Amino acid sequence: MSEPQADPSLAPDREKAIRAIKILLFSASIVAAIVGGAVAASVAHVSLFLFFLATAGLFIGQAGGDYLYYYFTHFHTDARDAHTKIFAGWRPLFTGTVIQPEQTLHAGIVCLALDLAIAAFFVLRLGPDILWFALGGGLVAIFFTPLMLRGLKEPVIFVTFGPLCIVGMAFALTGSWAILVPALVASVPVGIFITVVAYLKSARFDVVDAAGESVVLKLSRAAIIVLLALGYLSLIVGVVARVLPPLSLLGLVSLPLAVGVVRVVRGTSSRVSEYLWATVRSIVVSVVVGLFIAAAFVIPIS
């Protein structure tokens, strides 16, 4: 099957914006690693070598999932994730330059093999318990496309870049289940905000003028607004329950950006560029909240 092409009416700057956002989306694994590492550092000494190795594992796993997702949605499905999506035309890192589109299957397999080697190292160090996290991440990377096509994309994103990555990172660095509760609570707002990004990426469009500038988007507007509210609520509840450190509330400084996202998604027609910028804002929200939660765990206050 030949690779489906993006709508030719789309402006070139939109394609550039999409590629830039795809790079920013790697903040999902990086922020999860930082939050998990901070939770671990709050209760034990953390080896920088182990932290960077585990972070590399999360990053490589996300890249591998991207490669497999691209390959299967472009060569072995009905392309329901192409053409009419606001992100139609994106490609994983180095695709079209270092590797050809049809070689993304091999790239994904290489990434999974590298992650398997990293997982084997941690299994030898910590025992078989860590294997459950590695197995979960591998299954997500392999089966993400069929899960997406069954409408489970956003729940999978939440579980993966929330509890799975953050609790898994904290456990990999401590080898102790004592960090389960704080890591799990910290993972909820982080997972929710990256899920908002996933919903925005799933937006579909109908071009309503010849220039391709004005669009009517089909997206889960109510879900996005509710998730933003739940993200901030979970942050506040975590602090009130004394599981998250009080400084975590500094994540509320991202509220103006979230309001900007809401203003865009509440409309029924707008320029594609406005939704791209809304996606950028939603990524920044997830990064800001995650980094302030991480900082709160490692900065002592009297």
Image (tube, helix red, strand yellow):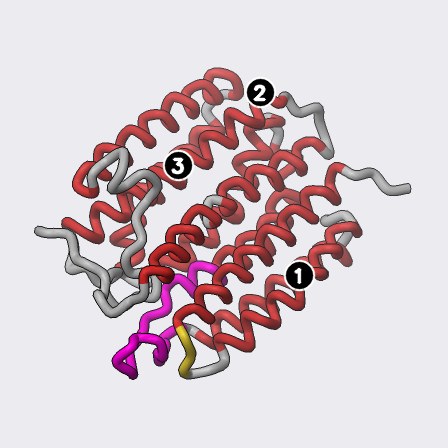
First-in-chain label (2 vs 1): 2
Q: Secondary structure at mark 2?
A: helix
Viewed as shown, does residue 298 lie left or right of 130?
A: right
Circle 2: residue type = Phe
Circle 1: residue type = Ser
Extent of the magenta region: 196-219
Q: How many marks?
A: 3
Residue nearest the observer in this picture, 295 or 187: 295
First-in-chain label (3 vs 2): 2
Tag 2 near tag 1, CB within 8 Å: no
Circle 3: residue type = Gly
Q: Residues within 10 Å of mark 2 (few under 14, many from 20)?
A: few
Residue ID for mark 3: 61
Specify the farthest residue to the left: 1
Q: Secondary structure at mark 3?
A: helix
Q: Residue at x 50, y 66 (%)?
A: 278
Residue 3 screen position, x and y as percent: 15, 52
Q: Secondary structure at mark 1?
A: helix
Residue ID for mark 1: 254
Q: Residue at x 40, y 82 (%)?
A: 269
First-in-chain label (3 vs 1): 3
